Image: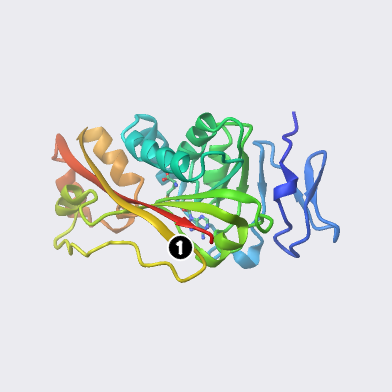
């Protein structure tokens, strides 16, 4: 069955004209055409907007992320995000999850806000392909946060779960009064793991930077909880983060001797609003 996209929200990533759907393709009046993949996503990431040949997380990182998140370890992060959406955008109709990864949070937002149109966008094709299996009603797409193929002022909310906020672009896509819920790691996030895998851990203060003027901050709260992981879970956690690409072999070997570890999960939930 061909997936139907909510095209009224979508614009051509090449010329900015509205997109329409005909059977298995989206097209604009300039006849730029984008085929819907059989998994149900559409590639709206033109080659000039890619910053590398295969941008974003690798398939191994994505598989580890899916397995780890499906075990529910970050459910409190999801709950805190949903609470912020309910508080600041109670009648949300269009929600864009930017940097959606393999779709864990996006699918939960769809369950929580069944009347809203959900868009999941990520720069990594492998991530979006995987996300399709989570929920076929979500409009999944490869796209970059800095040039979203989304019409001006059509979103009530944008989530950025441990991913990039492009303030000016997000402000373009939001309606006046629309919100961004941004989740970022706090200083103590996974600090116990970092002490094992790095020689020196610099505890930089990680408070999110003030907005540049396109959006205003209406709330910023610190949250944390503790999590005890066994060795296999710890390995998956390392694999799903960029630390996996940086850790030295001897430190990796040291982690392999750790049977279990209690970790701090610490993050900011910040809400930005378009005036
Ligand atoms: C740390 S992961 C978080 C994924 C997901 N939000 C989660 O928490 O499970 C960051 C995600 O942002 C995506 N990403 C990186 N740069 C991006 C960009 N410019 N535009 C859209 N997505 C991007 C990566 O491919 C990756 O899936």
Residue visible at 71% across and 51% down?
A: 10
- In the rendered view, does 68 fall on the left or right side of 32? left
Is 190 located above or below residue 55 in the figure? Answer: above
Report how many numbered discs are placed on residues in the image: 1
The image quadrant where one finds the N terminus is top right
Mark 1 surroundings: few (<14), some (14-19) or many (≥20) residues within 10 A: some
Q: In the rendering, at what x and y percent does residue 225 appear?
A: 22, 40
Q: 176 above or below 75?
A: below
Instruction: Tell me the SS state at disc 1.
Output: strand
Residue 215 to residue 88: above or below:
below
Q: Tell whether 147 sits left or right of 56.
A: right
Instruction: State the image coordinates of residue 123 (x, y, percent, origin top left).
Output: 55, 54
152 or 190: which is nearer to us? 152
Taking the spot 78% from the left edge, 60% from the top edge, the residue there is 17
**Relative to 48, does residue 192 appear above or below in the rendering?**
above
Look at 29% across and 58% down and name the residue there.
Answer: 246
Q: Which x, y percent locates residue 245?
A: 33, 56
Is 40 placed left or right of 213 in the picture?
A: right
- Colour mapping used in the image: rainbow
Q: Which residue is mark 1?
A: 216
For the point 34% across and 50% down, the residue is 241
159 to the left or right of 265: right
Q: Position of residue 6 (x, y in %)?
A: 71, 42
Asked if the beta carbon under badge 1 is closer than 8 A to the nearest atom of ligand 1, the reply is no
Image-quadrant location for residue 201: bottom left
């Amino acid at each position: 069955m061909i997936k139907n996209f909510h095209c009224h929200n979508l614009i051509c990533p090449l010329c900015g004209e509205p997109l329409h759907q005909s059977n298995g393709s989206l097209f604009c009046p300039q006849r730029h055409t984008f085929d819907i993949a059989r998994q149900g996503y559409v590639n709206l990431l033109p080659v000039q907007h890619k910053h590398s040949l295969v941008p974003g997380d690798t398939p191994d990182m994505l598989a580890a992320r899916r397995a780890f998140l499906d075990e529910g370890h970050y459910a409190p992060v999801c709950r805190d995000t949903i609470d912020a959406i309910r508080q600041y955008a109670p009648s949300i109709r269009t929600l864009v999850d930017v940097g959606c990864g393999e779709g864990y949070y996006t699918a939960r937002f769809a369950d929580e806000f069944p009347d809203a149109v959900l868009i999941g966008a990520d720069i990594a094709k492998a991530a979006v392909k995987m996300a399709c299996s989570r929920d076929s009603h979500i409009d999944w797409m490869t796209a970059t946060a800095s040039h979203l193929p989304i019409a001006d002022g059509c979103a009530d909310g944008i989530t950025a779960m441990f991913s990039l906020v492009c303030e000016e672009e997000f402000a373009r896509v939001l309606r006046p009064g629309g919100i961004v819920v941004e989740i970022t790691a706090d200083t103590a996030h996974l600090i116990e793991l970092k002490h094992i895998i790095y020689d020196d851990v610099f505890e930089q203060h990680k408070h999110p930077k003030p907005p540049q003027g396109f959006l205003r901050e209406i709330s910023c709260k610190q949250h944390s909880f503790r999590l005890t992981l066994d060795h296999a879970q710890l390995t998956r956690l390392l694999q799903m983060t960029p630390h996996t690409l940086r850790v030295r072999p001897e430190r990796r070997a040291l982690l392999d001797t750790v049977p279990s570890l209690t970790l701090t999960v610490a993050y900011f939930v910040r809400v930005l609003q378009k005036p």
